Amino acid sequence: MNERRLESPVFQVEDVVFRYGAVTALDGFSFKVNRGESVALLGANGCGKSTLLRILAGLSFPASGRIDFFGTPLTPERLADISFSTQFRRKVGLLFQNSEVQLFNATVFDELAFGPLQLEWPRDRIRKAVSDLLELMGIAHLKDRTPHRLSGGEKKRVALASVLILDPDILLLDEPTAALDPASQSQIFDLLISWRNSNRTVVLATHDLDNLEDIAGRCAVFDRGRIAADGAPLDILHDVALLERVQLVRPHHHKHEPGASQPYPHPHLHTGE
């Protein structure tokens, strides 16, 4: 990798258009991710967040526009090059929103071992790496279980572990804490927070506004296939009109306990003292 590419953004997306039949998911979409950033993608369901993550992962390709990976166009032709594709897949890991589509092996242990086996890691290294990660993710007791018979939260943790096993530099995470119990959510949040202090680049789609400042240094807000706002989490969270417009918050009636503080400003009507 030459010096020019090292100085390039990890991803540069320019004027991308992507459609599902007659439905436009991304419409003249432009976006950039720099090395080491943690970027949260915010927006209502169906706004294009998952589509963007698939495009960045090289699993979908737009009707028009351009995507660069460290200055190199990310195209079907480029990914057909085995040398480039192998390096790209080692560097970039994608967690799908639906864990079902990511799990296909007979056991949880096999699920984590699959990627390393494809890269021809030594067997001893695979066994140690899988065992260590099973312990880290709190799923060692599941190692001999069939993934499709696990709970939704367990499947999510196994799917994430199957991505983390290869230690990718770039993580694309689609709703990583969805369907998790509070303890598992806390564990994932701890990982996300730790990655902010590393060289790892993280792009995640999320609806969790309460933990936004801890897990992301930057937010991109989606609205009708475009970026409506891009900035620091605190600035985004204080823009109530924006959050309402993109349906991330809504006016509602509720009661505050005396002295209670809210994690971010939101419109409401007090119904009690």
Image: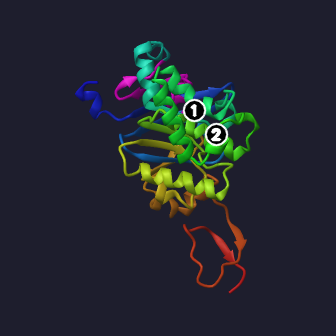
Residue 225 visible (yes or no):
no
Instruction: Pick out the residue farthest to the bottom.
Output: 273
Asked if residue 203 is positioned above or below residue 268 in the image, the reply reads above
- For the N terminus, the image quarter is top left
Visual colour scheme: rainbow
Identify the residue at horizontal 67%, vertical 27% (top origin).
Answer: 104
Tell which circle, 2 or 1, labels the residue nearer the N-terminal end.
2
Residue 112 painted magenta? no
Question: Is disc 1 placed on a helix, strand or loop?
Answer: helix
Task: Say which amino acid is labelled 1.
Answer: Leu
Counting from the top left corner in percent of width and height, residue 178 is at 65, 48
Counting from the top left corner in percent of width and height, residue 59 is at 56, 25
Label placed on residue 112? 1
Q: Is residue 193 left or right of residue 150?
A: left
Label placed on residue 25? none
Disc 2 and disc 1: Cα gap in Å? 18 Å
Label placed on residue 97? 2
Identify the residue at horizontal 58%, vertical 28% (top origin).
Answer: 18
Q: Is residue 182 left or right of residue 149?
A: left
Identify the residue at horizontal 50%, vertical 16% (top origin).
Answer: 76
The residue stretch that appears in magenta: 52-75
